[in-house]
């Protein structure tokens, strides 16, 4: 049994996904074995100070040490560790990469927005959907939003924008970036009728679970809007205690909703499919493509 690992160092959380790789009908598939999520919130430092504090850097090294030990115990043969928006923006990002290498012997890559978008769509979600439709693929993270337009299963345009949930909570999202995103998305979708959405990321997955929709059914704009209104009617404390949201989910879920709703309204998207995959899954798929296919 082959085992691969994906490490996703995001602006809100750090994730380790260990997956079992097998071959069925001539195709390589993976099954999630272990998924660990640690809410480090590197974005709070990176977006406000452009610098990750010694405390957070220390916590990241401890987390990566734990991940390395688990990967050893699980006999992982291949891994890829990627850091996104927060580490891209922190001036001491490359120092932390060196520190992690020295302490854990793990290689960490700080990836650009375009590579992040490419990894996310390595999931090839469009293969599961109607290939005659056009989709806007929206991945919302703590520091950035990755957008891709799929026409007949082919990515036609792709772009990363510095708009994310932690950035919005810290009031570090810029008006001109919103305008830039609006222009880009309208320019790249205006020729397509009946556009549908694909949403990935921890927040949309949580929203989908809260919606009680059947698996594989899309989430409607109307439903998402009413969930947003319900969530904003609760205080942060109530979202944690009455709705049972984790503290590190209860605040970011609101700006995440705002990003999805805004993009859906700009493009006339009435429904969004939520395939329950994200960056870590994309890394596993990419490793399979690079090492096995």
Image (cartoon, rainbow, N blue to C red):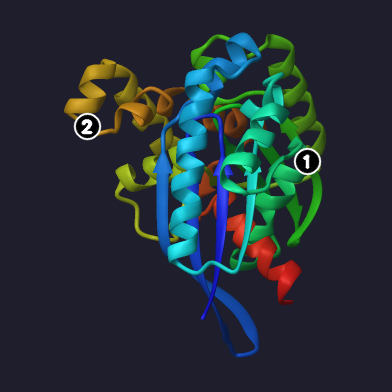
Secondary-structure class at tag 1: helix
Residue 191 visible in this rendered orientation of the protein: yes
Q: Are marks 2 and 1 in contact (CB under 8 Å)?
A: no
Q: Position of residue 282 (x, y in %)?
A: 62, 56
Q: Which residue is mark 2?
A: 243
- Closer to the N terminus: mark 2 or mark 1? 1
Viewer-side label of 2, 1: 1
Q: Which residue is mark 1?
A: 114
For image coordinates 56% across by 49% down, the residue present is: 7
Horizontal side of 277 relative to 122 (left or right) equals left
- In this view, the residue in front, 14 or 240, is 14
Spatial distance from mark 2 to mark 1, Cα to Cα?
Answer: 35 Å
Horizontal side of 139 relative to 20 (left or right) equals right
**Residue 182 figure quarter:** top right
The answer to whether 42 is drawn above or below residue 131 in the figure is above
Figure disc tally: 2
Horizontal side of 98 relative to 249 (left or right) equals right
- In this view, the residue in front, 32 or 253, is 32
Q: Residue furthest left?
A: 242
**Residue 185 figure quarter:** top right
Secondary-structure class at tag 2: loop
For image coordinates 62% across by 49% down, the residue present is: 106
Decide: few, some or many residues near mark 2? Use Cα within 10 Å; few <14, some 14-19, many ≥20: few
For image coordinates 49% across by 23% down, the residue present is: 56
Q: Residue furthest front?
A: 102
Horizontal side of 105 relative to 222 (left or right) equals right
For image coordinates 59% across by 10% down, the residue present is: 48
**Residue 22 figure quarter:** bottom right
């Amino acid at each position: 049994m082959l085992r691969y690992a994906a490490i996703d160092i995001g602006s809100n959380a750090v994730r380790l996904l260990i997956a079992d790789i097998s071959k069925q009908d001539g195709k390589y598939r993976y099954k999630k074995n272990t998924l660990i999520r640690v809410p480090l919130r590197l974005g709070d430092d990176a977006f406000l100070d452009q610098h990750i504090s010694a405390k957070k850097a220390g916590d990241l090294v401890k987390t990566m040490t734990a991940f390395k030990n688990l990967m050893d115990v699980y006999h992982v043969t291949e891994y890829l560790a990627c850091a996104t928006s927060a580490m891209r923006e922190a001036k001491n990002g490359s120092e932390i990469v060196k520190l992690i290498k020295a302490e854990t012997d793990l290689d960490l890559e700080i990836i650009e927005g375009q590579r992040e978008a490419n990894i996310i769509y390595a999931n090839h979600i469009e293969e599961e959907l109607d290939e005659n439709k056009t989709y806007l693929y929206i991945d919302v993270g703590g520091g950035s939003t990755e957008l891709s337009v799929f026409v007949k299963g082919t990515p036609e345009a792709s772009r990363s924008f510095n708009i994310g949930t932690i950035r919005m909570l810290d009031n570090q999202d810029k008006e001109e970036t919103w305008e830039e995103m609006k222009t880009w998305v309208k320019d790249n979708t205006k020729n397509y009728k009946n556009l549908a959405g694909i949403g990935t990321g921890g927040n949309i997955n949580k929203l989908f679970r809260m919606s009680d929709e059947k698996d594989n059914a899309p989430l409607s704009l109307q439903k998402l809007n009413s969930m947003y209104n319900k969530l904003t009617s609760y205080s942060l404390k109530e979202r944690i205690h009455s709705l049972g949201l984790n503290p590190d989910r209860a605040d970011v879920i609101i700006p995440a909703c705002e990003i999805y709703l805004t993009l859906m309204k700009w493009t006339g998207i009435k429904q969004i499919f939520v395939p329950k995959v994200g960056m870590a899954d994309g890394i596993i798929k990419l490793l399979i493509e690079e090492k096995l296919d």
